[in-house]
Amino acid sequence: MIQLIVSDMDGTLLNDSMEISSENIAAIKKVQAAGLEFVVATGRSIEEAQPILQAAGIKCRYITSNGAQIFDENGQNIFTVGIEKKKLALTMSILRHHQIYFELFTDHGGYTENIDDRIASVAHWLKSTSPNLSEAEAIEIAESHMTTLPINFVADFKEVLENPEVTVLKIFAMGQIDDPALLLAKEELSQITNLSVTSSGANNIEVNHESAQKGRSLQKVTELLNLPLSNVAALGDNFNDMSMIEAAGVGIAMANAEAEVKTIAKYETVTNIDNGVAYAIDRILAEEWQ
């Protein structure tokens, strides 16, 4: 019997406008009214994720930054794992060598060295998660959602790295879709020990500590709640979702998911723009998907 449903955000819970549809909101509230747990597991930081759920009137637990942090339903941090300083320096060196734009996500928010590059890169990222968007639509959404994708500007990342009170949770790199430089950089980064290197879209690379994986943090959440992983349903669409889809008793891939994600999932729901989370929840509550 499913007791907990965990969902990715981008390409899964969110539609092309980076919003939770009324259908998905209603379905999540049905889950919680039925006494089941609902958890968000995202590559986003808590600052990026929580306002969207709060605006929808949803209170839940969060796994953020690909598993680098866990927050309870009151927004209190209960787990954090950051990237070691030497690994940070090496990762940044590789990305700079390949001239790839990247951001630092920390326990004190996200940081960029160039706001304009940030908007352009977010637009490309949106297109990778929602291919039906035009370039102009993606840029418009990226500009209008700067408040829900908050970022801090620094002239040099040294300001962040040299602050002893800040822990870097994730490096998020973005480029053009199918850019050969991204593939080369990802291959080089994958050779670094103690790092988890994955992607949440065709134009990005996400680098975390090896212990920062959605599947590992999902297991921590189930242990806290004293629930077996076999009673968990996990929904996702991209490579950074694979660890939790594999860990859950019921793995569900979006129709818009990467082919490799679909191969490990037990079920496939409809796309994120067709309210795929709501569709899956209806199957789960009807005990059709177990």
Image (cartoon, helix red, strand yellow):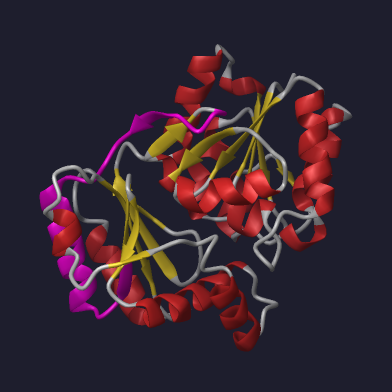
Point 85% across, 26% down: residue = 287
> Which residue is outermost to the top?
226
Q: Is residue 86 left or right of residue 185?
A: left
Q: In which quarter of the image is the C terminus?
A: top right
Give residue 112's quadrant in the image. Answer: bottom left
Q: Where is residue 127 in the image (x, y as percent from the top left)?
A: 58, 75
Q: In this view, does 214 lie to the left or right of 278?
A: left
Q: Which segment did they paint magenta?
A: 73-102
Q: Quadrant of the N terminus?
A: top right
> Which residue is outermost to the bottom?
136
Q: In this view, does 110 lie to the left or right of 40?
A: left
Give residue 129's quadrant in the image. Answer: bottom right
> Which residue is outermost to the right?
286
Q: Position of residue 75 (x, y in %)?
A: 50, 33
Frontmost residue, 190 versus 19: 19
Count all numbered tags in the image, as a single digit. Answer: 0
Point 58% across, 49% down: residue = 51
Indicate whether residue 81 is drawn in magenta: yes
Point 51% across, 27% down: residue = 72
Q: Is residue 282 left or right of residue 183?
A: right
Q: Position of residue 54 (x, y in %)?
A: 64, 44
Frontmost residue, 88 versus 234: 88
- Is residue 92 shown above or below 226? below
| Residue 237 shows up from this direction | no
Indicate whether residue 144 is drawn in magenta: no
Frontmost residue, 58 versus 196: 58
| Residue 133 shows up from this direction | yes
Q: Where is residue 258 in the image (x, y as percent from the top left)?
A: 59, 60
